Image: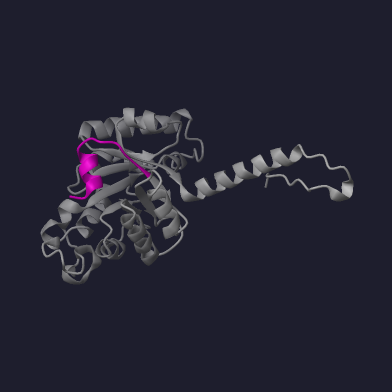
Amino acid sequence: MNPIKQRVLAGECVTAAWAEMGSPDNAEAMAMNGWPVIVIDGEHGIGDLERAVHIARAVEAAGGQAVMRVPDGSETTLKRVLDRGIRSIIVPQVNTPDYARAIAEYCTYPVRGRRGYAAPIVRASRYGAQADYAMRAHDDLLLMVQIEHHVAVDNLAEIAAVPGIDVLFVGPNDLAASIDRLERMLEPEPQALLKRIEAGAAKAGKPLGTIVGAGRDFVDLARLGYRFIIGPNDVSLIVNGARQAAADRDRQLASVRPAQETDAIPVHSSAY
């Protein structure tokens, strides 16, 4: 079985990092240095599906596992992503049980669903080397749907009950934005929606996923029952590292007092 799915369904807390920059090298470096589960962001990140496949190959070659947040839940998108060998998927903006049901059907072969068949010739089956791929693909798939709108919270029980939906993935900032609280996730109203999701998922017996934020860190989220938690992204790791290095440089150079103004070393602020 898909090892991420196996761990999540066993109740283990799986942590991950985002790949936003479309760089296989960045993703490989993260996978080799403490972040073996990489989520390729096809919704907001750089690159198309083929770039995502290159990133997945790099992560897998480094001994890690790749997840992809797809740009949308259309039949064409999901079919192509699955055929290209991505077996852990996050679908954004799933607000109704009908949409959740359609997504699950697009991702599974008949009779469970209506995924188009090309199993012997696609990367997902190792180009036919995995002869039983079509028979077991549904077991291998980890399907997460994003709960990131107040309408989805109202429909949570019905979405959670859709066969094939494995994890409810919370998008806290979009959730806040849906009630006119964009970037105000710590206010009482967004926090109340988060609590409703957590209570509803627990009642449905459905694992939760999310990102670090909204006032909660890895420990807070694990204690609340989240089983898939995404932390840093490659953009922030590079930008924060660059800013810290620039601040260190400026602090060091600030102590230099040249004897003559013409010999002075210019000190540049790290602020943008």
- Total count of labels: 0
Horizontal side, residue 271 vs residue 70: left or right: right
Q: Position of residue 122 (x, y in %)?
A: 22, 69
219 shown above or below 94: above
Furthest residue in direction bottom, as rendered: 121
Q: Quadrant of residue 57?
A: bottom left
Span highlighted in magenta in the image: 1-16
21 shown above or below 33: below
Q: Position of residue 81 (x, y in %)?
A: 29, 62
Q: Nearer the viewer, residue 248 or 184?
A: 248
* Residue drawn at x 23%, y 56% as measured from the top left: 102
Q: Would residue 117 be seen by someone viewing this image from the given angle?
A: no
- Colouring chosen for the image of the structure: one colour
Horizontal side, residue 98 vs residue 36: left or right: left
Q: Is residue 189 magenta?
A: no
186 shown above or below 2: above
Q: Would residue 3 be seen by someone viewing this image from the given angle?
A: yes
Q: Position of residue 186 (x, y in %)?
A: 48, 31
Q: Nearer the viewer, residue 241 or 155?
A: 241
Q: Position of residue 195 (x, y in %)?
A: 35, 30
Q: Is residue 10 magenta?
A: yes
Horizontal side, residue 106 vs residue 177: left or right: left
Furthest residue in direction front, as rendered: 259
Q: Quadrant of residue 50?
A: bottom left
* Residue drawn at x 42%, y 49% as measured from the top left: 30
* Residue drawn at x 23%, y 35% as measured from the top left: 11
